[in-house]
């Protein structure tokens, strides 16, 4: 199957999140790779509590807002120096039948290969890509009735000081009767270096060697618009199940609204 590549460009966080989710909300007739970058943001996993993941004051001081994606996993920091990629395959594709963690392997090997093509000695393990032992890629996934998606980030020229400051959450506290959230695992990170333009081309070449540039079809364009309006514009979505027990400082830096 020929992979179509959708270049999202530099977008607002909600637009990128809606694009990724829209890939799996309508039937696919072949693999699709979406590549985009974002204004500064923290993105938490679907089952995470925002005020356990962030330093709200650090986010406020830097003008960084916090958004929730539709997949699980840990919190990540985005800025224009981070490349986001999402690879979706239709339900009948061989990769869609893989279990965990095998389903991550095609994406992670592709990201590691992209790094190596840029002259960076990168190694993929079961859940990430590392350079000199430090994490450069984080991933999350969705397996649905219509399609399977694996998406993740590549730290190219991120502001690592801002990353560390914004993601310095307490990782715990009083639940206040709310559900127990999933928590991120702190890790050491680094940039692969170079330009984001070169990194985007390398990712497309590694994950979609038979690529055809494409735009969103009508179904996915409609799904993107619907998700933006109904989900990613909603502060309640970004607060999750913890809105009533979160600190006011954390609520103030939520996206949406």
Image: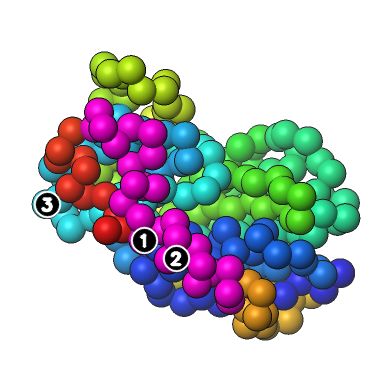
Residue 75 part of the magenta-drawn span:
no
Q: Does label 2 or label 1 sit earlier along the sequence?
A: 2
Q: Is residue 68 above or below residue 187?
A: below
Q: Is residue 113 above or below residue 44?
A: below
Which stretch appears magenta? Answer: 221-246
Along the line of sight, which residue is nearer the eye, 131 or 253?
Answer: 253
**C-beta proximity under 8 Å, tags 2 and 1:** yes
Q: Check disc 2 and report the residue beneath it.
A: 228
Along the line of sight, which residue is nearer the eye, 229 or 250?
Answer: 229
Q: Check disc 1 and report the residue beneath it.
A: 233
Q: Is residue 78 above or below residue 37?
A: above
Residue 227 part of the magenta-drawn span:
yes
- Count of number-bearing discs: 3
Find the distance from the CA under tag 1 to the CA under tag 3. Answer: 22 Å
Q: Is residue 158 above or below residue 97?
A: below
**Helix, strand, or loop for circle 2?**
helix
Residue 118 lies, in percent from the top left, at 56, 65
Of tags 3 and 2, the one toward the viewer is: 2
Q: Does label 3 or label 2 sit earlier along the sequence?
A: 3
**Helix, strand, or loop for circle 1?**
loop
**Helix, strand, or loop for circle 3?**
helix
Q: Residues within 10 Å of mark 2 (few under 14, many from 20)?
A: many
Find the distance from the CA under tag 3 to the CA under tag 2. Answer: 26 Å
């Amino acid at each position: 199957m020929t992979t179509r590549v959708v270049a999202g460009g530099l977008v607002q966080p909600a637009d990128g999140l809606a694009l990724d989710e829209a890939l799996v909300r309508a039937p696919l007739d072949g693999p699709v790779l979406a590549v985009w970058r974002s204004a500064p943001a923290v993105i938490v996993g679907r089952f995470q509590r925002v005020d356990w993941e962030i330093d709200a004051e650090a986010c406020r001081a830097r003008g960084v807002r916090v958004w929730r994606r539709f997949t699980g996993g840990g919190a990540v920091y985005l800025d224009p120096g981070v490349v986001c990629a999402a690879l979706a395959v239709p339900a009948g594709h061989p990769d869609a039948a893989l279990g965990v963690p095998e389903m991550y392997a095609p994406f992670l090997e592709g990201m590691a290969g992209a790094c190596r093509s840029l002259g960076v000695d990168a190694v993929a393990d079961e859940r990430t890509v590392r350079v000199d032992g430090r994490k450069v890629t984080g991933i999350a996934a969705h397996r649905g009735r219509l399609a399977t998606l694996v998406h993740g980030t590549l730290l190219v020229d991120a502001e690592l000081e801002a990353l560390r400051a914004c993601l310095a959450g307490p990782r715990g506290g009083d639940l206040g009767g709310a559900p127990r959230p999933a928590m991120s695992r702190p890790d050491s990170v680094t940039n692969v270096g170079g330009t984001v333009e070169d990194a985007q081309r390398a990712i497309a070449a590694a994950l979609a060697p038979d690529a055809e540039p494409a735009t969103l079809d009508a179904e996915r364009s409609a799904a993107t618009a619907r998700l933006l309006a109904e989900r990613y514009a909603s502060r309640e979505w970004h607060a999750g199940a913890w809105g009533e027990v979160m600190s006011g400082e954390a609520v103030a830096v939520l996206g949406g609204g």
